[in-house]
Image (cartoon, rainbow, N blue to C red):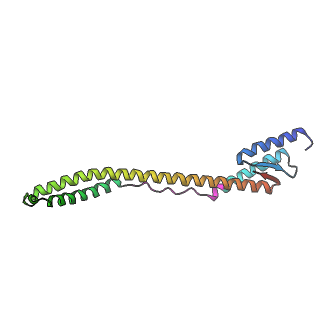
Amino acid sequence: MKHPMTRASVLMALVLAAPVHGSTLIPTQGQTSAQIQSDTAACQTQATQASQAAAPPPAAAPAPQGGRLRGAAVGAAAGAVGAEVRGNQHEAYDRVDSDVQEEYRQNQAREAAAAGVVVGGARQRQARRQTQQQQAQQQQTATQTQQQQGSQAFDACMSARGYTVQP
């Protein structure tokens, strides 16, 4: 590299290539500026293809559904059973008309079902948030893995083309 312009071109090519992968490239075989740019572009393409092929995106888990309905069903059953138990604790309950007993059980079941809808909805939202957090975490891990694999592929490609790659 006898020409100052060639040195400047090589340094410029190194500066442009370094931020992409965080490495410093040192040509060891007297590569020209055009060759450095060509090698860098080819290795970036190869690294991109290697990282995309190596890590498929994580599969999306289905969002939790039916929480409110399950909560209502459980609440209604619990309310009816609770009403029967509370009613049997009183002597007068057996003397009350069966229609009144049934209405009491239904009212208690309805109130418990309403509470169950609220609880079921809260649990469903919590499960959905956890699922979203897990998916985001998996996506982040996959992205980091792709970046690492791409960087390794780029470094290996540049080394094979006659460059010293320094972190």
Residue 56 lies within the magenta run: yes
Residue shown at 79%/46% (left/top)? 37
Residue lying at the far right of the rendered structure: 2
Residue shown at 38%/53% (left/top)? 123
Is 167 placed left or right of 7 in the picture?
A: left
Is 5 placed left or right of 41 in the picture?
A: right
Give the percent coordinates (x, y) of residue 149: 67, 56
Residue range of the region highlighted in magenta in the rendering: 51-64
Give the percent coordinates (x, y) of residue 136: 53, 51
Camera-side residue of 16 and 130: 130
**Quadrant hosting residue 62:** bottom left
Viewer can see residue 49: no
Residue 7 lies within the magenta run: no
Residue shown at 35%/54% (left/top)? 67
Camera-side residue of 153 and 77: 77
State the predominant SS element of the stretch in magenta. loop
Give the percent coordinates (x, y) of residue 1: 90, 44
Tally of numbered discs: 0
Residue shown at 22%/55% (left/top)? 109
Camera-side residue of 24 and 63: 24
Give the percent coordinates (x, y) of residue 51: 65, 55
**Quadrant hosting residue 90:** bottom left
Is 85 placed left or right of 8 in the picture?
A: left
Viewer can see residue 149: yes
